[in-house]
Amino acid sequence: MSSTTTATTRQYEGLFLFPQAVTADLGAAAEHVRESITRHGGEVVSLVKWDERKLAYDIRGNKRGVYFLAYFTAQSSVVASIERDCNLSERMLRALIVRADHLSAEQMKDAEGQAKLALEAKLRRQAPESAEGEGEQGAVPPLD
């Protein structure tokens, strides 16, 4: 057996928690996750806003949080560096990264939500403007 170790590229699943205030700019939060992974040579396969939930306990004064789910590939030797960057980030509350060898590349790509995330970010920016005429849209026409 050789004493030198070689880093192996593996599949990973990461769950990243942000404060609820990030809903004002979901695109920036998604880019922060992407940058945290790619900075160390990882390749993001899928990134989606997973959910917005009440937290079981306050984290840095936050009662609610927004979760992002990412599937990515990276050298096994850099995962600790990715986790370290996430833990040092002032914008991110928590991060959990686990191996996802049980998923195929197709399954990871199926979880892709870039288009959905971009649409939601755009709709959230436009929400105050479109709320004015909202009552008329769902009106049911009278029966004759």
Image: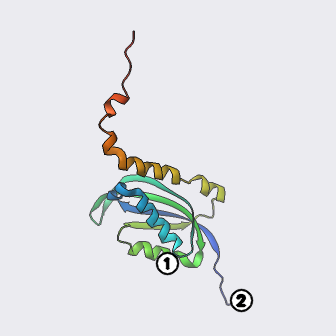
Q: Residue at x 71, y 89 (%)?
A: 2
| Label 2 environment density (alpha carbons within 10 Å; few <14, some 14–19, many ≥20) | few
What residue occupies the far top of the structure in this picture? 144
Q: Residue at x 67, y 89 (%)?
A: 4
Vertical comparison of 134 with 36: above or below: above
Vertical comparison of 120 with 76: above or below: above
- Residue 104: tell me if it is visible: no
Question: Where is residue 76 shown, x and y percent of the image?
Answer: 59, 76
Amino acid type at circle 2 is Ser
Question: Where is residue 71 shown, x and y percent of the image?
Answer: 55, 62
Give the residue pinned by disc 1.
81
Amino acid type at circle 1 is Ser
- Residue 26: tell me if it is visible: yes
Give the residue pinned by disc 2.
2
CB-based contact (under 8 Å), mark 1 and mark 2:
no
Closer to us: 89 or 98: 89
Q: Residue at x 32, y 43 (%)?
A: 129
From the viewer's perspective, is 85 left or right of 75? left
Question: Where is residue 135 shown, x and y percent of the image?
Answer: 31, 31
Colour scheme employed for the rendering of this structure = rainbow
Vertical comparison of 119 with 33: above or below: above
Q: Which quadrant of the figure contains the N terminus?
A: bottom right
In what element is the residue under mark 1? helix
**Which circle's residue, 1 or 2, is located before the other in the chain?**
2
From the viewer's perspective, is 9 left or right of 52? right
| Label 1 environment density (alpha carbons within 10 Å; few <14, some 14–19, many ≥20) | some
User: For residue 45, which quarter of the picture?
Assistant: bottom right
In what element is the residue under mark 2? loop
